[in-house]
């Protein structure tokens, strides 16, 4: 079996992602692998044309979302670096599953670790599953970890 050198962990900073992060950290420690934390900011495409809201409001909201994501990612990277892990963060923008799969391929990840939210029924139908799409499109193994 091929040695695992680089693990990509996709996070949305949720409880399910935190549980998957624990698994990714364990794998990274066991294999002395590099850990790449990826967060994807999905652009707000709902700019109503006929609204009374100022379009600048949406731009400001988008910038605030980006700043918050960057801050959360940096905190997570710093925490793991203090735990003596080789870790880096990558903040991306776009469709979550596409960006995760592209990052794994471009960064030559040996595996992806991603959390699942355990959605069922109508919620799953309407929201879809980022983890499911990553599993079906990734070119490397994907380990899904169900949230608590």
Image (tube, helix red, strand yellow):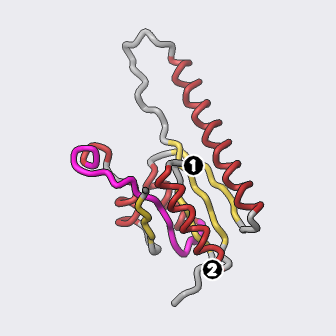
Report the front residue among 87 and 25.
25
Q: Is residue 113 magenta?
A: yes
16 lies above or below 61: below
Report the front residue among 34 and 80.
80
Residues in magenta, as a range: 107-124
From the viewer's perspective, tell me whether residue 51 is left or right of residue 57. left
Badge number at residue 92: 1
From the viewer's perspective, tell me whether residue 84 is left or right of residue 33. right
Q: Determine contact: label 2, label 1, CB under 8 Å.
A: no
Q: Disc 1 on helix, strand or loop?
A: strand
Q: Nearer the viewer, mark 2 or mark 1?
A: 2
Report the front residue among 139 and 113.
113
From the viewer's perspective, tell me whether residue 2 is left or right of residue 51. right
Could you tell me which residue is drawn at 50 percent across and 55 percent down?
Answer: 17
Residue that sits furthest to the bottom in the current view:
1
28 lies above or below 87: below
Q: Position of residue 147 (x, y in %)?
A: 43, 57
Count of residue discs: 2
Residue under pointer 2: 30
Q: Disc 2 on helix, strand or loop?
A: helix
140 lies above or below 114: below
Could you tell me which residue is drawn at 28 percent across and 49 percent down?
Answer: 124
Q: Is residue 90 magenta?
A: no
Q: Position of residue 131 (x, y in %)?
A: 40, 59
Could you tell me which residue is drawn at 43 percent across and 9 percent down?
Answer: 52
Q: Which of marks 1 and 2 precedes in the sequence?
A: 2
Q: Position of residue 28 (x, y in %)?
A: 63, 73
Residue that sits furthest to the top in the current view:
52
Marks 2 and 1, how far apart in space?
28 Å
Q: Position of residue 2 (x, y in %)?
A: 54, 87
Could you tell me which residue is drawn at 24 percent across and 47 percent down?
Answer: 125
- How busy is the neighbourhood of tag 1: few (under 14 within 10 Å), some, or many (20 plus)? some
């Amino acid at each position: 079996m091929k040695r695992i050198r680089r693990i990509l962990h996709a996070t949305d900073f949720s409880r399910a992602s935190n549980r998957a992060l624990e698994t990714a950290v364990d794998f990274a420690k066991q294999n002395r692998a590099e850990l790449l934390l990826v967060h994807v900011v999905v652009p707000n495409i709902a700019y109503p044309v006929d609204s009374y809201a100022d379009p600048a409001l949406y731009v400001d909201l988008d910038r605030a979302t980006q700043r918050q994501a960057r801050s959360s990612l940096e905190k997570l990277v710093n925490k793991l670096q203090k735990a003596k892990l080789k870790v880096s963060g990558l903040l991306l923008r776009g469709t979550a599953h596409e960006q995760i799969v592209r990052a794994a391929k471009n960064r030559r990840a040996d595996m992806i670790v991603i959390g699942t939210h355990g959605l069922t029924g109508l919620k799953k139908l309407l929201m879809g599953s980022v983890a499911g799409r990553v599993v079906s499109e990734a070119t490397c193994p994907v380990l899904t970890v169900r949230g608590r």
